[in-house]
Image (spheres, rainbow, N blue to C red):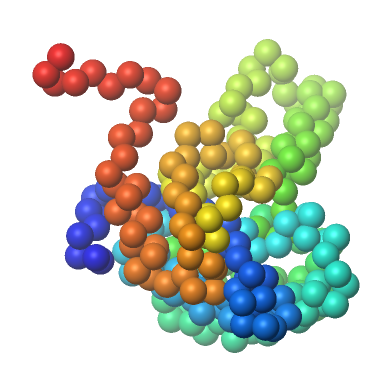
């Protein structure tokens, strides 16, 4: 399947809503945190798969602002898992020339998490292969509201004329400033929701839904999503004239 992918038509940016950890654990008669622990392999496989293909950006929806309302024990387990995973994967990121970035309200994360993230971001900052973006304590509505607040501050200070505000300018106030919008959004577990993820950025993104639960997601599933993406005609709201018309 890897050989079937047209490397000249790769999506530059793939975003993933990693869903199904809890259901995966439940099927095995275990607690939800068991699913989260077993999802690390899926993260590693997807990251390596994108790096091997030559995808430039991969954004993983790791923890939403709504996730803070989950049971305290689960949140604690997730935060501990995040720290240990970052520690364990930094060498692998360096080996694969992957740069780590984050988007979201990361200041809400425990200090230990913030420290480990900062160290990994610093260690990988000069890597020029795949950029792996972790969306942590993130939501699309929060991001848009923050962008509006900061834009209005610049208008009020006289640093920005409201008459020149455009979609391109607004994008400069988002967390993803300088990063191209995703061409492909993958959601695992079969759920048909966007879940408050990159709401501005996915205006024309191709969406691919798979029934595979996230802990079972592997490179072959990534390749299937990319192949499906390459079959689609991206119109961006326009009508594509047929050569036979």
Q: Which residue is drawn at 83% across and 65% down?
A: 70
Q: Is residue 133 visible?
A: no
Q: Is residue 42 visible?
A: yes
Quadrant location of the C terminus in the rendered image: top left
Place of residue 107 in the rendered image (x, y in percent of width and height, measured from the top left): 82, 61
The image quadrant where one finds the N terminus is: bottom left
Q: Report x, y in % for residue 93.
A: 50, 76
Q: Residue furthest left?
A: 244
Count of marks placed on residues: 0
- Seen from the viewer's position, the closer of residues 8 and 67 is 67
x, y percent for residue 15: 51, 53
Query: x, y (%) of residue 156?
Result: 84, 24
* Residue at screen point 61% across, 46% down: 193
Task: Determine the residue positioned at 49% across, 82% down.
Answer: 92
Q: Is residue 136 above or below residue 41?
A: above
Residue 153 lies, with reference to residue 199, above or below; the image says: above
* Picture quadrant where residue 118 is located: bottom right
Residue found farthest to the right: 72
Asked whether, in this view, residue 186 is left or right of residue 199, the answer is: left
Q: Residue at x 71, y 76 (%)?
A: 32
Is the residue 213 above or below the residue 150 in the image?
below
Q: Is residue 119 left or right of residue 168?
A: right
């Amino acid at each position: 399947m890897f050989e079937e992918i047209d490397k000249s038509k790769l999506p530059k940016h793939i975003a993933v809503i990693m869903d199904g950890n809890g259901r995966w654990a439940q099927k095995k008669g275990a607690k939800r945190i068991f699913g989260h622990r077993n999802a690390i392999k899926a993260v590693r496989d997807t990251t390596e798969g994108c790096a091997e293909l030559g995808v430039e950006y991969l954004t993983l929806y790791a923890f939403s602002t709504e996730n803070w309302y989950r049971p305290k024990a689960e949140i604690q387990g997730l935060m501990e898992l995040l720290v240990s995973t970052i520690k364990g994967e930094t060498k692998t990121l360096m080996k694969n020339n992957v740069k780590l970035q984050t988007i979201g309200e990361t200041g809400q994360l425990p200090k230990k998490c913030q420290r480990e993230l900062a160290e990994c971001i610093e260690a990988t900052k000069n890597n020029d292969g795949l950029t792996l973006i972790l969306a942590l304590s993130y939501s699309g509505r929060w991001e848009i509201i923050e962008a509006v607040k900061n834009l209005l501050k610049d208008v009020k200070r006289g640093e920005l004329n409201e008459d020149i505000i455009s979609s391109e300018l607004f994008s400069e106030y988002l967390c993803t400033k300088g990063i191209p919008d995703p061409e492909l959004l993958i959601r695992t577990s079969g759920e048909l929701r966007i879940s408050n993820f990159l709401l501005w950025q996915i205006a024309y993104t191709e969406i691919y839904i798979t029934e595979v639960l996230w802990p079972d997601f592997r490179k072959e599933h990534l390749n299937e999503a990319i192949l499906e993406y390459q079959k689609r005609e991206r119109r961006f709201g326009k009508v594509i004239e047929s050569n036979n018309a």
